Amino acid sequence: MSEKTILIVEDEPIIGMELRESLEQAGFRVPAVVRNADSVMPAVISHSPDLIIMDIYLKSFIDGIDAAQRVKMMKDTPVIFLTAYPNDSIRKKAMTIKPAAYLLKPINDDELLKEISKVLG
């Protein structure tokens, strides 16, 4: 099986770095950690990820849910949402795009890898 590519969208540099390190140690290719919603589409076009791990709250004009909707209009790339804010209205909005998973921060590496395994087989 070829190495799977995962794009990380996370505006907190330390969290993005930790996610990248964990995923690379698990054998995934992580070509970029995108820090704002405006950079998501160019990164998807450039890297053709097999999966996107997307923070919901980004320091951008649009949030991670809106960025994921834009991606889904172009390409049906699975998305795992991450959030530090367990808010029911945000969760309902996120579920409208049918994410592969919706996880609360802080993220446990084993939990994340289990969800990734479900998505990528």
Image: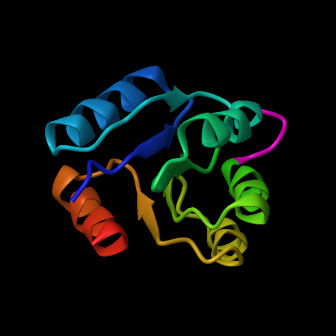
Residue sitting at 79 percent across and 64 percent down? 73
- Tell me: 111 left or right of 67: left
Q: Main secondary structure of the magenta part?
A: loop
- Can residue 83 be seen here? The reply is no
Q: How many numbered marks appear?
A: 0
Q: Quadrant of the N terminus?
A: bottom left
User: 68 and 102: which one is in front?
Assistant: 68
Q: Is the residue 69 above or below the residue 14 in the image?
A: below
* Residue 30 at x, y percent in the picture: 37, 35
Residue sitting at 71 percent across and 55 percent down? 71
- Tell me: 27 left or right of 16: left
User: In this figure, which colouring scheme has been used for the structure?
Assistant: rainbow
* Residue 98 at x, y percent in the picture: 61, 77
User: 42 and 99: which one is in front?
Assistant: 42
Q: Quadrant of the C terminus?
A: bottom left
* Residue 105 at x, y percent in the picture: 39, 50
Q: Is the residue 88 above or below the residue 67 in the image?
A: below
- Tell me: 7 left or right of 92: left
The image quarter in which residue 110 lies: bottom left
Residue sitting at 53 percent across and 62 percent down? 86
Q: Is the residue 106 above or below the residue 89 in the image?
A: above
The magenta stretch spans which residues? 59-63
Residue pushed farthest front? 1
* Residue 74 at x, y percent in the picture: 76, 59
Residue sitting at 22 percent across and 38 percent down? 22
User: 105 and 65: which one is in front?
Assistant: 65
- Tell me: 19 left or right of 13: left
- Is 118 contained in the magenta span? no
- Can residue 118 be seen here? The reply is yes
Residue pushed farthest right? 61
